[in-house]
Image (tube, helix red, strand yellow):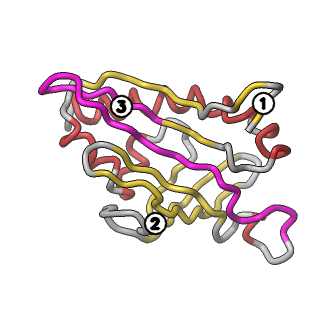
Amino acid sequence: MSVAGREYQPISVSRRIGAPASVIFPILADPGRHREFDGSGMVQGLVTGHTISGVGDVFVMKMYFDELGQYEMINHVVEYQLDRRIGWEPEAGRGHPNAEPGAERSARWGQRWSFELTPDGPDAAVVTEIFDCSQVPEDQRVDIDYGNIWVDGMHQTLERLDQLVTRPG
């Protein structure tokens, strides 16, 4: 997809975390823990779901966004490689205006959230959070500045994840 004459690149933020991927990945794969490391402040908790075990799993999160209030997001797992990569595509759920019959926009926009873990020695990994909106309609990509609105929250997410695994308790 072209963005102002150049190819769109997903937004990504990386951080070296002083724990092996085998310690970090189970936290990412447990939707019940997502609120603990969410840097956006939007994730309120798990509605339904279980520890992610593969592509095709679905989990529903309770969310809050100032412009929308409380709503739910249905997350479809589309990437899963144990201790290496996990990702999902959100779909508007209960309470979200795009989930209503006759909504102006589709409930599933095509954005994808992923985490990639790259070992960096025996006791560390580089964790990269990726937001890919290449499949999102152009007008909606513009609304979210091609994903750039999420960068600060992504940095905070990785900082919180780092604190969870390196300063447990």
The three-letter code of the residue at mark 2 reads Phe
Position of residue 2 measured from the top left corner of the image (x, y, whole percent): 77, 34
Task: State the residue in front, 67 or 124.
Answer: 124
Label 1 or label 2, whichever comes before in sequence order = 1
Dividing the picture into quadrants, the one containing residue 46 is bottom left
The stretch in magenta equals: 103-129
The three-letter code of the residue at mark 1 reads Val
* Element at label 1: strand
* Element at label 3: strand
The image's mark for residue 59 is: 2
Q: Which residue is drawn at 73% across and 70% down?
A: 99
Q: Mark 1 points at which residue?
A: 3
Q: Name the residue under label 3.
A: 127
Residue 111, compared with residue 71, is above or below; it is: above
Q: Which residue is drawn at 44% across and 71% down?
A: 48
Distance from Cα at disc 1 to Cα at disc 2: 32 Å
Which one is in front in this view, the residue at disc 2 or the one at disc 3? 3
The three-letter code of the residue at mark 3 reads Val
Please rate how many residues cluster around mark 2, counting C-alpha atoms within 10 Å: few if below 14, some from 14 to 19, many from 20: many
* Element at label 2: strand
Which one is in front in this view, the residue at disc 1 or the one at disc 3? 1
> Is 84 one of the magenta-colored residues?
no
Q: Residue at x 41, y 41 (%)?
A: 115
Dividing the picture into quadrants, the one containing residue 57 is bottom left
Distance from Cα at disc 2 to Cα at disc 3: 22 Å
Q: Is residue 67 left or right of residue 91?
A: right
Position of residue 66 measured from the top left corner of the image (x, y, whole percent): 71, 46
Task: State the residue in front, 48 or 28.
Answer: 28
